[in-house]
Amino acid sequence: MMTPSFKDHFSGIADRYVAFRPRYPDALFDYLAGAPRRRELAWDCACGSGQATQALADRFISVIATDASQSQIAAAPSHPRIDYRVAPAEESGLPSGSADLVTVAQALHWFDIDRFYAEVRRVLVPGGLLAVWTYGVLHVEDREIDALVTRFYRVTLGPYWPPERELVEKEYRTLPFPFRERRPPSFRMEALWSLLQLLGYFRSWSATSRYVAAHGDDPVSALADALSLLWGDPDRVREITWPLFLRVGED
């Protein structure tokens, strides 16, 4: 089921999400598992193809994972403690007072936020928590490569990012968050990727798809030519990092 406000930027690239999206750090999920009073049920909202869901299932008795995209849900790997459902963020279908933790990974900027917060309050148990996070622009260990990547993100793809991207760049700090907010630890994401993995990640961006739709050609191909001159052996792995911004609150 999809609501009229659902902006589907990712169904057409669900397979790339599974293959090329970075992993969130285990320390993040260890912190989230220890934050609520109990670990009976977590609701992973806008779960995509399960990037955060699997880690939650390792720490909670059960997880309900919802996404408005049938394609994303279909691409998610199964797990005995995960119940995947197609549902919008604002109408989860969960029973009232059932979830100990609600998580939203890299998706809050797409929601009808007032309706979503009302749904969170309905679904959470007393003392339950909402945790939302986003991650910023990646950095590559090599300065010259990093400069090319930054230019690709800001100049080549700049006009093709949806306006909601600005909320990500501002670390969700400009979004309302009407909950008693906690001060969580700092986290960052890390990966060791080959050139092929990095290029696959770029092709999973919504702005890349919008560029292709507008121009009929893949902007990552030109970037690949430039990066290959600096990368060296394409199988060589380099350290990639992303700053991660987390907000946690109790109703």
Image: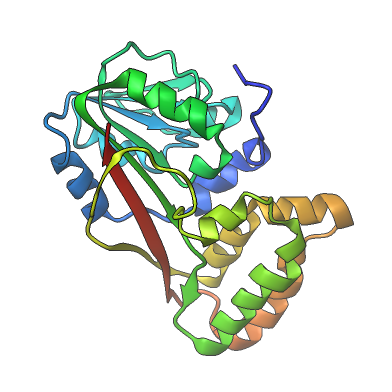
- Decide if residue 92 is on the left or right side of residue 155: left
Whether residue 165 is visible here, answered yes or no, is yes
Tell me which residue sits at (66%, 35%) in the image: 8
* Residue 109: quadrant of the picture: top right
Whole-percent x, y for residue 214 in the image: 86, 53
Of 15 and 170, which appears nearest the observer? 170
Whole-percent x, y for residue 88 in the image: 53, 23
Tell me which residue sits at (33%, 49%) in the image: 247
Above or below — where is 158 with respect to 229?
A: above
Whether residue 204 is visible here, answered yes or no, is no
- Decide if residue 212 is on the left or right side of residue 50: right
Whole-percent x, y for residue 71 in the image: 59, 29
Tell me which residue sits at (37%, 38%) in the image: 178
Above or below — where is 210 with respect to 100?
A: below
Of 138 and 83, which appears nearest the observer? 138
Of 148 and 130, which appears nearest the observer? 130
Whole-percent x, y for residue 95 in the image: 33, 11
Total residue callouts:
0
Tell me which residue sits at (58%, 25%) in the image: 70
In this picture the colour scheme is rainbow
* Residue 57: quadrant of the picture: top left
The quadrant of the image that shows the C terminus is: top left
The quadrant of the image that shows the N terminus is: top right
Above or below — where is 236 with respect to 193?
A: below
* Residue 103: quadrant of the picture: top left
Above or below — where is 11 with respect to 200?
A: above
